[in-house]
Image: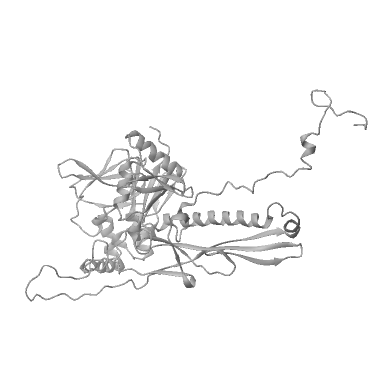
Amino acid sequence: MSVGEELRTDQGKPQQSLGTAAARNLATTTKSVPQMQEISSRWLLRTLPWVDVQGGTYRVNRRLTYAVGDGRITFVKTGGQVEVIPAELGELPALRSYEDEEVLAELARRCRQRDFAPGEVIADFGNRNDGVHLLAHGRVEKIGTGPYGDDSVLGVLADGSYFGDQALVDPDAIWEYTVRADTASTVLILSRQDFEQIAERSQSLRDHLAQLRSIPEQRTNKYGEKAVDLAAGHSGEADIPHTFVDYEARPREYELSIAQTVLRVHSRVADLYNQPMNQTEQQLRLTVEALKERQEHELINNPEFGLLSNCEYDQRIQPHDGAPSPDDMDELLSRRRGTKLFLAHPRAIAAFGRELNKRGLVPETIDMGGNRIPTWRGVPLFPCGKIPISEARTTSIIAMRTGEEEQGVIGLRQSGLPDEIEPSLSVRFMGINEQAIIKYLVTAYYSAAVLVPDALGVLENVEIGRWR
């Protein structure tokens, strides 16, 4: 444009005032601090009681418990053929702590595969129990007879479960309930006849079974803990029993886990671009937010101390109809005293809401820091996007009792760290390198502990895609 040429607008008219694009060069804009989509509500970190751990380790002492094998079994699938991993047979009560790999491999080879259609009966009440059944895939219902003669669902089993294991140690065992396939199911069956044939040829297996039969002589309570002998209701000069409370010889210890990163900020940015907001502070703020998101993810999913991995198998239940119904939530609540909170993926909460709508139920809500949180039976149901959703569009709902005094779930941390900006979270200056880059080491220490098994429960395989 020449010096004498007039500025013209898009409509071809002469421009009569300074344009906004040019004016912004002389104006100070109003701006926000840097935003970050990853930041979530992090209800787990906010509601979990935190215990300071000195020395980086927390030991959970419990009464002595006689474990009888109640884990899940893992399988390998090749095309349509399913095989059980031999070492996984050690999860069966009859083979608990048995380590002869050759015998376990032979037992695994003797397992025969059977597929059942939905509604097909796998085992019938009153019939002779001919072997242990390993559920490789699908869902089955255990059905018994109610007090008035009608059918009653005793429980729902899913992938990795087993039933009928009493047949391995009791030749006269019968089915005390009916097992019916709820979905298409694949089951591996190890017959008692095959088990006895292998036991006849294996001295180590015979010795193991003989030792196993001595365990029931130990008096235990319903939780498997060594019983405390007491006398009550007696009169006169009755002999009072002698007792003591035995402890686990090797209690579990939780070491604090760690999440770290090195934040780098160029000195030129820190020196020249700190108005109207401090660049280093904003970089640090967003880094700490990302670190906390990772911390909550680990508390849910870490295989060593995560809540989903540390829930005992007898505290895991299956929904009766796939979708999370009020009945399923009541069953989850009934497994423990004093449940403090539920944790569920937002889509699982939506699925639960649909089930409530079908029944015409409206959940109560409570105010938590200005947020309206739905409740069930007075227990808040907090959203947690860190709980995974599987490819089959299923997820889990967690129920917890919290606090040391309640023998619940607790968070672990260590406060008083050098250069600490929050409890158990520190930012350390690491110096400036030859490229004039300032470095800060950002570290968080954390873990979680379940003090007694019934403090934590999980409703697994919850369907979130059902709309009718």
Q: Position of residue 430 (x, y in %)?
A: 67, 67
Q: Residue at x 19, y 47 (%)?
A: 127
Residue 110 visible, this orientation: no
Residue 59 visible, this orientation: yes
* Closest to the observer, 184 or 350: 350
Total numbered badges shown on the rendered structure: 0
Q: Position of residue 26 (x, y in %)?
A: 79, 43
Q: Quadrant of the N terminus?
A: top right
Where residue 29 sits, quadrant-wise, is: top right
Where residue 109 sits, quadrant-wise, is: bottom left
Q: Hey, which residue is sitting farthest front in the picture?
A: 17
Q: Position of residue 335 (x, y in %)?
A: 30, 53
Q: Quadrant of the C terminus?
A: top left
Q: Is residue 28 left or right of residue 378?
A: right
* Closest to the observer, 112 or 284: 284
Q: Hey, which residue is sitting farthest left in the picture?
A: 236
Q: Is residue 442 above or below residue 297?
A: below
Q: Residue at x 34, y 44 (%)?
A: 319
* Colour option used: one colour
Q: Is residue 269 left or right of residue 409?
A: right
Q: Position of residue 125 (x, y in %)?
A: 20, 46
